[in-house]
Amino acid sequence: MPNPRCACRSNDATASGKPRYALELSGGLRTFLVTWPALSCNLIERNGGRSNWWLGIESPYDGRTQAKVGAAALDVVKDWDHVHIFAEDKYATCAYYDIHDRDRCDADFFPLSQDICSKRLAKSSTARKSGGVVKGELCVGGMVQRNKTNTKCDSHCQRKYKGFAHQWESVGRCHAALKRSPAYQSVEFILRTRPDVLLLQDLDLNGVVREMAVARSGAFLPCETMFGGYIDDFVVANKSAMDAYAAKEPMKTEDGHASFQRVAETRVGKVLQPYNPIVRIIGHGILDLPMIGKYVRAGTYLPVTYHHGRCVGKEAQRGACPGMEHPAFAQEHYQVLKDYVRAHAPTRADVS
């Protein structure tokens, strides 16, 4: 018997025939090739279909290892309204944050090899207690690759540099593209999320909009952080709240190094607070690369460590549609991602 949650239910588009919603997909590509079919079904088709949406994507990838992944992603989004899928360029990212000196970008702001993060971690209390220098992990393309000592990554330092810099550059550029579009006039609500976000059940945006209206809220988030703040990977917002959310984060100097004033969840909480955001779990999560196999075959969501298990929720996971049964699933795109994971993921990756 077919899984009823694999059928893409749809409701009517706006009477005007113009898009009411905009999707700003921004951040690293990662698992986009297998998460998009579910997002297409449970979000786009569920809320009026393609004609009811402006679709945009700004997504960097690692040009050294993910060229085929990037090419496959371009094939998926060829009919979107705004498409910018590109190899990471640290100098372009530095320039976006008004750092135009390449030497400063290399040595200070953008340590791709985590030199600065390693040095800071070496001075930390953890390193002092261990009696040695802790080099940390290099987190590449959404996967964790441990160093020879099997020690842990200084993830906060990483977010303040490579991860956050690329992600919020993509957020800002995608939102700017929407505002330049003629469709912006008819758009009422904007949904920003990451390309590797998985939506395991349908999301009725009419219901979300009603909740926002009752609460007099300008933003809706589908989960809180482990510490009660707002997550930074998914938001539905009106235009004013999204302007604040997508604004370029100011820089500061910290310990002699260029840095951001706020990053990730801390930043989102600060800028959205005036808009009285509401939170309700809707069954979304980050799909990590090593976990794509079981999701595609069985619809199983397996978080890496603490990532998003609390956000997905048991109800969304119960009877979820296997990724391969969504109408938009393409075996050739999955194969591209499998080949990449086999070449670069830890041995625990399940891509059979």
Image (cartoon, helix red, strand yellow):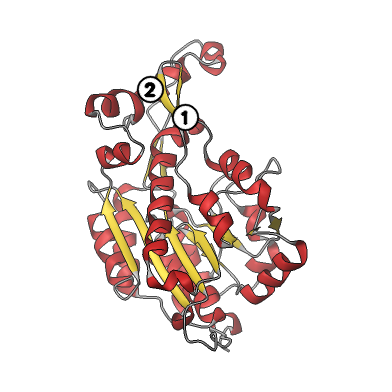
The residue that label 2 is drawn on is 116
Question: Pointer 1: residues within 10 angstroms few (<14), some, or many (20+)?
Answer: some
Q: Residue at x 47, y 56 (%)?
A: 194
Secondary structure of the residue carrying numbered label 2: helix
Q: Amino acid at mark 2?
A: Ile
Residue sitting nearer the eye, 352 or 200: 200
Under mark 1, the amino acid is Cys
Q: Nearer the viewer, residue 4 or 349?
A: 4
Please give the residue where the numbered disc 1 appears in the rendered image. 157
Residue 103, percent across and down?
A: 23, 24
Residue 141 horizontal side relative to residue 246, left or right: left
Q: Which residue: 23% across, 29% down?
A: 102
Residue 204 visible? The answer is no
Asked whether disc 1 touches disc 2, contact meaning CB atoms under 8 Å apart, the reply is: yes
Residue count near mark 2 (Cα–Cα under 10 Å), binned few <14, some 14–19, many ≥20: some
Residue 29 left/right relative to 230: left
Q: Earlier in the sequence, mark 1 or mark 2?
A: 2
